[in-house]
Amino acid sequence: MSTGGDHIYLDYNASAPLRPAVRDLMVEVLARAGNASSVHGAGRSARGHIETAREQVGALAGVPARNVMFTSGGTEANVTGLSPAWLFEGNPLHLDRVFVSATEHPSVLSGGRFDKKMVEQIPVAPDGVVDVDFLEERTKAALSEGERVLVSVMAANSETGVINPVAEIGRRIADTGAVYHVDAVQAAGRMPLDVSRWKADAVSLSAHKLGGPQGAGALVLGAEDMRPVALLTGGAQENRRRAGTENVAAIAGFGKAAELIAASAEEWAEISRLRAFMEEGLRHIWADTVVFGIGAERLCNTTCFAVPGVTSEMALIGLDLDGIAISSGSACSSGKVSVSHVLTAMGVEEDVARCALRASIGWATKRQDIERFLEVWEKVSGRIRPGKAGAAA
């Protein structure tokens, strides 16, 4: 997608461009006054937008609308779900510790509302897929020791695009009494979501990863009678599950984006073709290009790659000066270039990890955008690492 002039945006995993139909709806909603908690006509209109969005997001996740709780984004959804205090049929349910995969988003790695001493990381294989056998063993061991745990595994990694077997994990831990949370922020709009098949108790989503606005997300519950104790209290909004006046325009935009995603799965095939074209081009420029997670199932839109000797920091500067927007990994790493904890967990050597870049594409990406990126990449990488393109220099 061109962002104006010759600028090419290939950083959808950081934030996807707003879809035009989403923008139009949000402008319409913003033009009207109204608090969704008010009983007059304006308030009922605002409430209507929220409930329509709840239906749309529920349909995307495969759950009833009543199971959708809106939040300010993916991080709030994660922190809400990662709680040692849950309610089951209105009765308190206490969890003793939390198991998270070593490649999770920082909001999950931190353990949410669990004490840091109660957070345990589960290793991943060299391809980035969580070690399901180890996770199952640890969960069962905790049960035998009288502990009840929360397991949190992301559906797809934001940096590598590697997809975890979340349905298999749900099946394996189903009899342990563990509460199961899935961070599906990067997965939504890029692979099918099925909360029921995953056997997940809670799933996190974020609007701006799928062409909706920033500032809206959701915690989707697997069952209406089981939920975490509220993170934000003091009001009756979201069925008393999350206090605070709702961001009506952002929620409406979230719902519209979810509806468009559900109706446009054919986008995935085209995006997958563009990614294959891009990866072929990268290897043609430098034969020793490393594509991380290539042996695993990956999101159709994500390529995390490195050329030894071409450091991320230098490459990003050069690409940006030539109008190409990609990243060195997660956008939630405070905007600085550092060694990725994801690649470290995968056992990637530090000198290679320091060269890692991520190109993520999406609904508005065109073939000419990829062609332009490859043209600029050959020039920029060639300046940093003099040698013959197409060979391991």
Image (tube, rainbow, N blue to C red):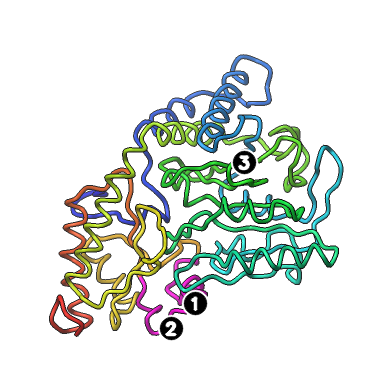
> Mark 3: which amino acid?
Val
Q: Is residue 35 magenta?
A: no
User: How far apart are the alpha carbons under marks 1 and 2?
Assistant: 7 Å
Residue found 33% across the figure and 69% down from its top: 291
3 or 2: tag closer to the N-terminus: 3
Residue position for label 3: 220
Residue found 39% across the figure and 48% down from its top: 16
Residue position for label 2: 350
Find numbered disc 2 in the image and state the secondary structure of the residue it sits on.
helix
**Cβ–Cβ under 8 Å for marks 1 and 2:** yes
Find numbered disc 3 in the image and state the secondary structure of the residue it sits on.
strand
Find numbered disc 1 in the image and state the secondary structure of the residue it sits on.
helix
**Cβ–Cβ under 8 Å for marks 3 and 2:** no
Residue 15's spot in the image, x, y percent?
Answer: 42, 51
Residue position for label 1: 344
Residue 154's spot in the image, x, y percent?
Answer: 55, 57
> Mark 2: which amino acid?
Glu
Count neighbours of disc 1 (C-alpha within 10 A) and say few if under 14, some if 14 to 19, many if 20 or more: some
What residue span does the magenta drawing correspond to?
333-356
Identify which residue, 309 or 286, lies in the foreground. 286
Overall secondary structure of the magenta section = loop
Residue found 56% across the figure and 63% down from its top: 104
1 or 2: tag closer to the N-terminus: 1
The residue at the far top in this view is: 41
Q: Does the magenta stretch include residue 335?
A: yes
